């Protein structure tokens, strides 16, 4: 079983976020980045499936920033191959990223593509859906469980309100992973450094990513500061009366 896991780096939300001079994006010059949380879960699920059923795991990412380190970290965790897709811009949309990933993945042997279900900077959370369309394979998103039976997968999909559904799908397939069965494994820096010395970082062209669809940011701004919190005290009747007054406006 061969599994491919697209990963990306996203701004670390513990950092102070500033808007760039265009007013349509983040100032990324001094931002700290980390691997998208859901991509980390996708990689963990892929590694668990490999450990149970054999095969290979390939971590793939669009070129940019410090993505080499993220790919070597994936290798340190157990990925067999790491591939950097070249030719994209600094901040491609999901539509552009999906096109480039599809161009690269189309030349690879795979059974499953595990994407993260979304990222903190997504506007639509549709990377896996669009990628499956370009690859012309089935897709299931918000996945919280995967089991293998022969050439079929049984997939647990989560809906709102705690409802879950069980699907059976053939392979190849794209799965949008919400949560792996186990917490993503930790990898020490020393192991990442060893991976940098022993792992070949392959490069594949992403080809044309000329897409004419998707959303565009017209303006970004910080919320206006409103009044502070009001602490309500007193008797039950007094607090209830004050709450009613606030709700009525």
Image: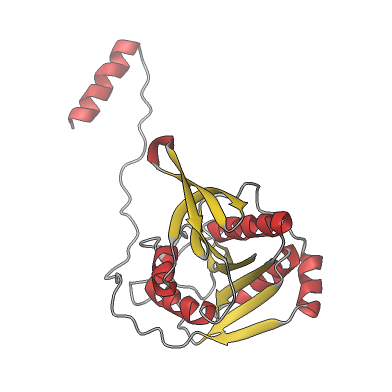
**9 lies left or right of 187:** left
Q: Quadrant of the N terminus?
A: bottom right
Residue 8: image x %, image y %? Answer: 54, 69
Please tell me in which quadrant of the rendered image residue 35 appears.
bottom right
Q: Quadrant of the C terminus?
A: top left
Residue 208: image x %, image y %? Answer: 42, 87
**Residue 109 in view here:** yes
Please tell me in which quadrant of the rendered image residue 123 appears.
bottom left
**Residue 18 in view here:** no
Residue 226 vs 5, above or below: the answer is above
Task: Name the residue furthest front.
Answer: 150
Residue 180: image x %, image y %? Answer: 60, 50
Q: Nearer the viewer, residue 221 or 169?
A: 169
Please tell me in which quadrant of the rendered image residue 218 appears.
bottom left
Residue 35 vs 223, above or below: the answer is below
Residue drawn where x is 39% and y is 63% of the image:
126
**239 lies left or right of 125:** left
Residue drawn where x is 33% and y is 72% of the image:
23
Q: Nearer the viewer, residue 148 or 45?
A: 148
Residue 91: image x %, image y %? Answer: 44, 76
């Amino acid at each position: 079983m061969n599994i491919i896991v697209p990963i990306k780096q996203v701004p670390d939300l513990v950092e102070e976020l500033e808007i760039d001079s265009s007013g349509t994006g983040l100032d990324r010059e001094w931002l700290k980045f980390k691997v998208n949380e859901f991509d980390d879960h996708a990689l963990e699920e892929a590694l668990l499936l490999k450990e149970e059923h054999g095969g290979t795991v390939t971590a793939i990412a669009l070129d940019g920033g410090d993505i080499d380190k993220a790919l070597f970290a994936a290798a340190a965790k157990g990925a067999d191959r790491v591939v950097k897709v070249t030719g994209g811009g600094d901040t491609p949309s999901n539509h552009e990223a999906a096109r480039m990933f599809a161009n690269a993945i189309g030349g690879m042997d795979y059974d499953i593509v595990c994407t993260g279900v979304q990222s903190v900077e997504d506007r639509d959370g549709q990377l896996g859906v669009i990628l499956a369309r370009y690859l012309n394979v089935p897709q299931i998103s918000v996945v919280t469980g995967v089991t293998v039976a022969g050439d079929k997968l049984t997939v647990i999909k989560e809906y709102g309100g705690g409802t879950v559904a069980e699907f059976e799908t053939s392979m190849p397939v794209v799965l949008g992973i919400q949560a792996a069965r186990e917490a993503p494994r930790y990898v020490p820096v020393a192991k990442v450094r060893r991976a940098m010395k022993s792992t070949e970082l392959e490069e594949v062209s992403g080809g044309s990513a000329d897409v004419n669809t998707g959303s565009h940011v017209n303006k970004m701004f910080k919320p206006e500061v409103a009044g502070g919190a009001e602490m309500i005290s007193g008797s039950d009747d007094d607090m209830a009366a004050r709450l009613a007054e606030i709700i009525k406006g």
